[in-house]
Image: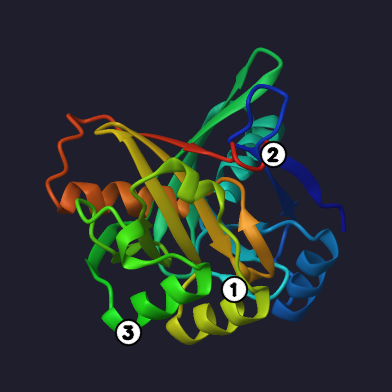
Amino acid sequence: MTVLRIAGFSDGNKCGNPAGIWIGDDLPSASKMQAMAADVGFSETAFVAPEGGAWRVRYFSPLCEVPFCGHATIALGAALALQYGDRTFRLKLNRADISVAGRRDGQTIAAALQSPPTRSAPSDPLLQAHLLQLLDYSIDDLDMKIPPAKIHGGADHVVLALKKRNALARMNYDFERGRELMERAGLITIALVTAENPQLFHVRNAFAAGGVLEDPATGAAAAAFAGYLRDTGWPHAGVINIVQGEEGNR
């Protein structure tokens, strides 16, 4: 079973976040997909098969299945465009129907995804305290203009906004503690963000729940965060730019 390896959110032919892409006539068993994802070792591998005029997609991290992954969807759009030409592809996820468009763009492939619907709610104070302790931040590190929240865009995340970029740079945590805490809370990532200005954000995403210390670039958490900014009336004037991966040279 051949797995393509494609980096989503790349800078031309450099960096980005690699995802595994498997395309077949029928999806393998869940146990087989889990084993293959663990063997690939990327933060996510997408498994895809045709179904009723669309494509059935399931995403697996090295440790578990996840309901939605943005960078793997971008990689999937590129893979489908390579095989079937420039177009928009309908996708059937476990809990949502979305689409991804792929097209050739010179020496690279460009892709754009439609996120599942987003929603947000205030974070649980006890969970917030546990996350701050895990990440070695204090309440004084938080930028309360963007209050801590549970955000959703096909999967659940928590966003913590930090006042200073250097606080973002020092992100570190005990992996096993983080994995256990995120599993209990049902979180896919912990999104740490700093606002350079109302339209430009720098972000890092802890992903211990999936078996990876940090996901260099995510589409699912980014879309959920954008939805949260919309929900709070943030003055973005219709444009949000999210920069990811700089701290890890990705």
Q: Tell me whether the residue at label 2 lies in contact with that at label 3, contact meaning CB atoms closer than 8 angstroms.
A: no
Amino acid type shown at disc 2: Ala
Q: Position of residue 44 (x, y in %)?
A: 66, 59
Residue at the spot of label 2: 7
In this view, the mark in front (1 or 2): 1
Who's the residue at 36% across and 60% down the image?
A: 159
Left or right of residue 98: residue 134: right
**Residue sitting nearer the eye, 59 or 149:** 149
Residue 226 spot, x, y in % from top left: 30, 46
Give residue 155's position: percent from left, percent from top: 43, 66
Q: What amino acid does circle 1 point to? A: Ala
Q: Is residue 93 above or below residue 202?
A: below
Q: Position of residue 240 (x, y in %)?
A: 31, 34
In the rendered structure, the answer to whether residue 196 lies left or right of residue 91 reads left
Quadrant holding the N terminus: bottom right
Say if mark 1 contacts mark 3, CB within 8 Å. no
The residue tagged with tag 3: helix, strand or loop?
helix
Label 1 to label 2: alpha-carbon separation? 21 Å
Query: Is residue 14 positioned above or below 50 on the image?
Result: above
Q: Earlier in the sequence, mark 2 or mark 3?
A: 2
What whole-number distance in Å separates the C-alpha atoms at marks 1 and 3? 19 Å
Q: Would you name the residue on which mark 1 appears?
A: 209
**Amino acid carrying mark 3 in the image:** Leu
As measured in the structure, the alpha-carbon distance from the residue carrying label 2 to the one carrying label 3 is: 36 Å
Residue found at the very far top of the displayed protein: 106
Q: Which image quadrant: the C terminus?
A: top right
Instruction: Mark 1 or mark 2: name the one nearer the start of the chain.
Output: 2
- Which one is in front, 200 or 82? 200
Write down the quadrant of residue 150 in the picture.
Answer: bottom left
Question: Residue at (27%, 29%) from the top-left corner?
Answer: 239
